[in-house]
Each structure stands twice: as structure tokens, then as C-alpha cells.
Amino acid sequence: MTTQTIVLNGGSSSGKSGIVRCLQAILPDPWLALGVDTLVDAMPAAMQASEAGIDFTPDGQVKVGPDFVALDAAWAEGVAAMARAGARVIVDDVFLGGAASQQRWQKALAGLEVLWVGVRCDSAVAAGREIARGDRIRGMAASQADVVHEGVLYDLVVDTTRAESLACAHEIATAVSSREARRRRRGSPARLRSG
């Protein structure tokens, strides 16, 4: 089975979006990029800044309500359906619930070959990026830098504190190709030596 889904988890401003764009450029097959921002942007405006939906507090905290949780679960199932239908998908997410968030994805992606990637970044560096971006609430990067990784198990961890997006993407692409090579070796019949 080939890798069908790459899940990147990291806090806000950790560099996931840049890595995703680089992955799409260097991976040999076409990969769809879908992120939690895609989901939030697709929601009705009334669900943003709503207790039932998603709310961004002035100190950078993110609070989600039952309507968001229901749509998030449906979205994850939809992403999994695309992968099962043959699309290769890169998911850019923020596991606000740490291990519980990963478990929700594991349930949706059951039966698929998934590469789990942690995207780490020093909180001070992420906070600096957050200020430079200007499109995030200050404090979000620092509050998410560590909590999103709590209890999460990864196949690979990259750190964007000092590494550029392209270098991290190359590490991930190498992990995907290594998996493919191992799969091919396991699937090929043993060669017999002629005597």
C-alpha cells in the first residue's frame, strides 16, 4: 500500500503551510493540500466568533463548540474518502486536543497508509513569525507551540526553528519514498541464486 495521506501537525505559524507548498512541488505525484484553515474558511461566517462554532480569544486561545466539532468530524471523513478514492492528500492541522485530536484522525483514516509528521518550532520564533504575518491574533503561536504535540505519536518530526520549509519538505519526501521502497521490497518475490 502506498502512502495516501501525510498529516502535518503543528501550532500556528510553525511553518506547515510553507512545507505543504514545497511538498506539492517536489513530490512526484499530485497531492491535494487541505488544512484546518480550509475548513474554517468554508464555514458560515456566523460560526466564526461563536460559542457553538469557533472562537479566537484576544489572548490567542482557540475555543471550539459542538457545531465546529461536528463539522470537523465530517470534514475528516471527507478527506479520508478522497484518499480512499485515489487522491493523495496532505493535511495541515493544529491538534488543539493533542492525542485526542490525533485519535479522531486515526479513526477517520483507518485502513489508509498515513505518514504522521510533527512540525515543531520554538515558541519565540513562531511568535515572531506571527507578528510578521499580521493575520493572526498575537499569542496564538506561543500558546499552541507545545500543547498540540502532547501525547501525539509521529513517524517523523521536523523543526522549522532553523530549517527552511524546503529542507523539511525534502525530509518528509524522503520518508515517503523510503516507505515506498520498503513496500516494494516486501512485495517482490525473493530472488533465488542459481548454482
Image: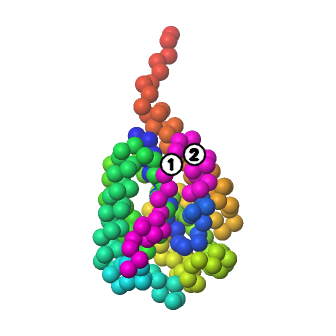
- For the question of whether residue 150 can be seen, the reply is no
Task: Using the numbered discs, state the Cα–Cα distance from disc 1 to disc 2 in whole angstroms.
Answer: 8 Å
State left or right for residue 19 relative to residue 82: right
Nearer to the camera, 101 or 71: 71
Magenta span of residues: 20-46
Mark on residue 194? none
The quadrant of the picture occupied by the N terminus is top left
Badge 2: how crowded within 10 Å, few (<14), some, or many (20+)? some
Count up the numbered dots: 2
Q: Is residue 2 above or below residue 153?
A: above
Find the residue positioned furthest to the top. 195
Please identify the quarter of the rendering in which residue 163 is found.
bottom right
Q: Is residue 37 above or below residue 170?
A: below
- Residue drawn at 50 percent across, 48 percent down: 31
Can you identify the residue that label 1 sits on? 31
- Residue drawn at 31 percent across, 63 percent down: 74
Q: Position of residue 46 (x, y in %)?
A: 38, 80
Please identify the quarter of the rendering in which residue 63 is found.
bottom left
- For the question of whether residue 70 can be seen, the reply is yes
Residue 38 counted in the magenta span? yes
- Element marked by disc 2: loop
- Identify which amino acid the numbered label 1 is placed on: Trp
Can you identify the residue that label 2 sits on? 27
Find the residue positioned furthest to the bottom. 58
Question: Which numbered disc, 1 or 2, marks the residue closer to the eye?
Answer: 1
Please identify the quarter of the rendering in which residue 73 is found.
bottom left
Q: Position of residue 129 (x, y in %)?
A: 65, 75
Pointer 1 and pointer 2: residues touching (CB < 8 Å)?
yes
